[in-house]
Amino acid sequence: MKSTSSFANKKVLPWIFLCLVLSLSTLPSRAEKARGIPAESGREGVWDSGEKASPADGDRIVFGTIGEASNLITYLSTDSASHEVADLIFTALLRYNKNLEPEAWAAEWYRLEDGGKRMLFRLRKGILWEDGVELTAEDVAFTYRLVIDPKTASPYAEDFLRVKELNVLDRYTIEVIYEEFFARAVATWMSPILPKHILEGRNIRDTPFSRKPVGAGPYRLKEWQSGSRIVLEASETYFGGRPHIDEVIYRIIPDDATMFMELRAGRLDVMNLNPLQSLRQTSGNWWDNEFHKYRYLAPVYIFLGFNLRHPFFSDIRVRKAISLAINRQDIVNGVLLGQGEAAFGPFKPGSWAYHQKLQPVAQDVAKAEQMLDEAGFMRKKNGLREKEGRPLAFTILTNQGNEQRILTATLIQSQLAKIGVEAHIRTVEWAAFTREFVHKGNFDAVILGWTIPQDPDIFQIWHSSQAHDGGLNFVWYQNAEMDKLLEEGRSTPNRAQRTRIYARIQEILNEEQPYCFLFVPYALPIVQRRFEGIQPALAGIMYNFEKWFVPKALQRHEVVK
């Protein structure tokens, strides 16, 4: 759930969907194909800057991000800002290609045997950590043991706990055995490999490695100025070949409007526009000559989530009433200017797991009022509702700098007032928001987002075993039927059967409304036109970031090495 400052290329972490989406200043990496929404450039039908140039090394690229990374050990962090930086520093056995199909990455090849219950990986030889030590099968085994160690307390441990045994067969070969088929087995091994020779024996939750990581990916950390910027430099030893762009800078700008001014002034190269900026503020010859614009349905959904331990929201009638009071299409039209779709559940429209018959909850103020009456919250003379002397008032919490979420909260506040519910709005700086409020369950209701995975396994967000401090089920949702379905869904190989399972899961969420699912936005990234090698695909535009380049004649910065 991120108010994404996200420019994640999402090669390393297929479970990035578990991360909090920082803001819609994110650059999601998967384009929408099934819904027929093409990516678009600043000029209709134009994908590059003109003549084809030969790839060249050099220059830097500057991304704008609302949120700052918190921890570059990705097994401990749950924010997109951390993951998108770490994605460029580390490597993994597997990754998704441009068509969102699994392919070998640090692995030379991999095989599934015994109905998917046995996996074999053969590592490429000669992969080097930044310090020159070779990456081997022992690093993969160490990473696995580290993640499942209770002392690590990783929110991503569940996938790895499904492994029955992991065996190092030789320096470059790993065998993974599962007790039963596990739907997310392949995706699990798209997770980053960590260096055994550096981290073994250390307290993973208290190590300088979280801010000074040593990776084997395309980039390495050069500089981190807290609250200001993170700088990466191209790795000369990356096994996939040195990236063309010398330097990647993430500038931390906790305000959408300020970020846009920096883009216009030429101090940013890439950001994700909000709808107003995309539709009305970036039109004309200057913008067309300077930038490419793209548009595709983002792999992100935004929601209003309830703390189910709160006495108001433990009553399903209150949750349903609030959901019925919200006009989702008004939010899409008013806040997103039509650049998105109303949502009813956690899957992307057009994906195979998406329920074909459910519709977003339609606003019904009369029914909402009836439900609150039944729950014992009666209107008083001042128009507000009370029960046993306690007013039906609560606070909606969201992150600072995310104008879309703040506007969404404001519109919801207005809609709830019509049924006698008093909603207050509070915004908190991103790091404190996640650390002190979300992960500790210290909230009434939150507006956040989750990125949407390729595989529909949402065990870690909705299973009751994940409802604990620091867990991803931070609304404390518990439902025995849901638990059973989630367990079946991840252990069933047949897609038709899984489709039925996840359809029922969506029906339960629709019936119980632990979240009010609000909308799926369009991603609206804009990229300075001098950058070439961008090839929009089903995976979006960031999947081949190492291949982006600036022709020599257009390079603006000489990077000091």
Image (spheres, rainbow, N blue to C red):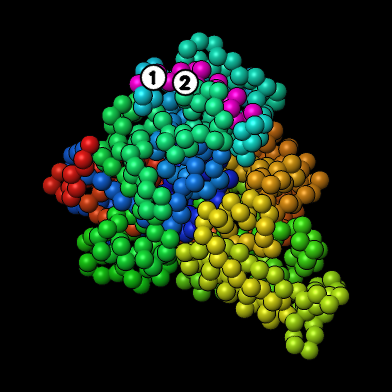
The residue singled out by tag 2 in the image is 197
Query: As rendered, which of 230 and 165 lies closer to the eye?
Result: 230
What residue is rendered at 47% in x and 59% in y?
Answer: 24
- Range covered by the magenta-colored residues: 132-149
Q: Quadrant of residue 375?
A: bottom right
What residue is rendered at 65% in x and 45% in y?
Answer: 470
What residue is rendered at 50% in x and 10% in y?
Answer: 170
Residue 149: image location, x then y, percent:
64, 28
Q: Quadrant of residue 252?
A: bottom left
Q: Is residue 51 left or right of residue 484?
A: left
Query: As rendered, which of 256 and 27 lies closer to the eye?
Result: 256
Q: Is residue 344 left or right of residue 399?
A: right
Residue 143: image location, x then y, percent:
54, 26
Residue 222: image location, x then y, percent:
33, 39
Answer whether residue 144 is magenta in the image: yes
Q: Which amino acid type corresponds to the residue marked 1 in the rendered image?
A: Val
Q: Is residue 1 visible?
A: no
Residue 326, numbered label: none
Q: Is residue 480 visible?
A: yes
- Number of dots carrying numbers: 2
Q: Is residue 487 above or below residue 140?
A: below
Report if the CB atoms under discs 1 and 2 are less than 8 Å apart. Answer: yes
Name the main secondary structure of what is drawn in magenta.
helix
Gap between marks 1 and 2 measured at Cα: 8 Å
Residue 72: image location, x then y, percent:
47, 39
- Mark 1 falls on what kind of element? loop
- Mark 2 falls on what kind of element? helix
Answer whether residue 223 is magenta in the image: no
Which corner quadrant holds the C terminus? top left
The residue singled out by tag 1 in the image is 133
How busy is the neighbourhood of tag 2: few (under 14 within 10 Å), some, or many (20 plus)? few
Q: Which amino acid type corresponds to the residue marked 2 in the rendered image?
A: His
